[in-house]
Amino acid sequence: MVGGEAAAAVEELISGVRRATDFAEQFRSYSESEKQWKARMEFILRHLPDYRDPPDGGGRLDQLLSLSMVWANHLFLGCSYNKDLLDKVMEMADGIEVEDLPQFTTRSELMKKHQS
């Protein structure tokens, strides 16, 4: 009954993905669009195993949620942060595909254009 074992394994995997998605859903901000949430949820789920809170607490999950917000705010709102922090979240998000991102002009770019 190899087929039955494979089907059970697939069902267990699907169930695990559903539980993870349901768990992550509680962290969605009411102001996030579907596209923003989908991208941020992928960021969260990708790193959730590494940021689970230990039994004695520790705030690792809070750290992951904060990093996901930094990444999303940078991508979707154009917020800027410390270079080391941005480097970290961009590395964590490597491979997450987000289409049709807004284009932002930084203050420095505006000043250079105005001075020319």
Image (cartoon, grey):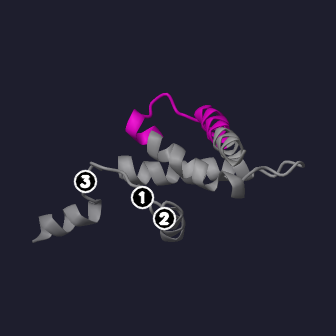
Horizontal and vertical percent position of residue 26: 62, 31
What residue would you read off at disc 3?
103
Residue 87 shown in magenta: no
Is 74 in front, or is 44?
44
Q: Residues within 10 Å of mark 1 (few under 14, many from 20)?
A: some
What residue would you read off at disc 2?
86
What residue would you read off at disc 1?
80
Q: Mark 2 vs mark 1: which is more N-terminal? A: 1
Give the quarter of the figure containing the C terminus. Answer: bottom left
Q: Nearer the viewer, mark 3 or mark 1?
A: 3
Is 16 in front, or is 59?
16
**Tally of marks:** 3
Does the image show residue 33? Answer: no
Q: Mark 3 vs mark 2: which is more N-terminal? A: 2
Main SS category, magenta section = helix
Horizontal and vertical percent position of residue 60: 73, 53
The residue furthest top is 30
Q: What residue sits 52% from the left and 62% below the top?
A: 89
* Label 3 with label 2: CB-CB less than 8 Å: no
Q: What residue sits 52% from the left and 33% below the top?
A: 29
State the image quarter where residue 21 is shown. Answer: top right
Real-space CA distance between mark 3 and mark 2, rounded to the nearest whole angstrom: 17 Å
Q: What amino acid does circle 2 point to?
A: Leu
Horizontal and vertical percent position of residue 83: 48, 70
Real-space CA distance between mark 3 and mark 1, rounded to the nearest whole angstrom: 13 Å
Label 2: which secondary element: helix
Q: In the rendered view, does 54 fall on the left or right side of 29? A: right
Label 3: which secondary element: loop
Range drawn in magenta: 13-37
Q: What amino acid does circle 3 point to?
A: Gln
